[in-house]
Amino acid sequence: QVQLVESGGGLVQAGGSLRLSCAVSGRTFSPYNMDWYRQAPGKEREIVATLEWSTGTVYYALSVKGRFTISRDNAKTMVYLQMNSLKPEDTAVYYCAADPSGNGRNVYWGQGTQVTVSS
């Protein structure tokens, strides 16, 4: 069993920064991707950033490119999402996800952390 626990959400003013953390624990696990998703009220969950675990290649949604950075620690037990120049439209619950095979099946999810950006 794999557990993902997010932290670091909160309330911030527009233009500010937050860093989200995702602690990965459980059985020895090497996912294909680690992803950050978000879901705003009344909207569908959308992917924000992806980290290919074996290569370290990263991908971003256009809406956050240049402002958000996904990374991991050397021990590969933490995944981070550094969010800069935050906008009110970034307000959402942010979820960490581990995709074992890169096909969106049997994904492990964290419980989510709320990010609220005030204008």
Image: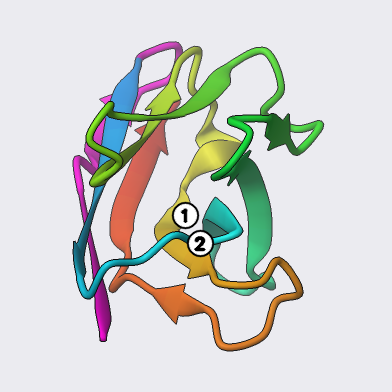
Q: Magenta segment range?
A: 1-16
Task: State the image coordinates of residue 80 (x, y, percent, origin top left).
Answer: 35, 35
Q: Which residue is mark 2?
A: 31
Q: Is residue 2 magenta?
A: yes
Density class for disc 1 (Cα within 10 Å; few <14, some 14-19, many ≥20) is many
Say if residue 39 shows up in the picture: no
Query: Residue at the spot x=67%, y=28% of the render?
Result: 64
Query: Residue at the spot x=47%, y=64% of the render?
Result: 97
Front tag of 2 and 1: 2
Which quarter of the picture shows residue 108? bottom left
Q: Classify residue 38 as left or right of residue 7.
A: right
Task: State the image coordinates of residue 94 (x, y, percent, origin top left).
Answer: 42, 55
Secondary structure under tag 2 reads loop
Q: Nearer the viewer, residue 84 or 24?
A: 24
Query: Residue at the spot x=36%, y=66% of the render?
Result: 29
Which quarter of the picture shows residue 74? top left
Density class for disc 2 (Cα within 10 Å; few <14, some 14-19, many ≥20) is some
Q: Which residue is mark 1?
A: 92
Residue 81's tag is none
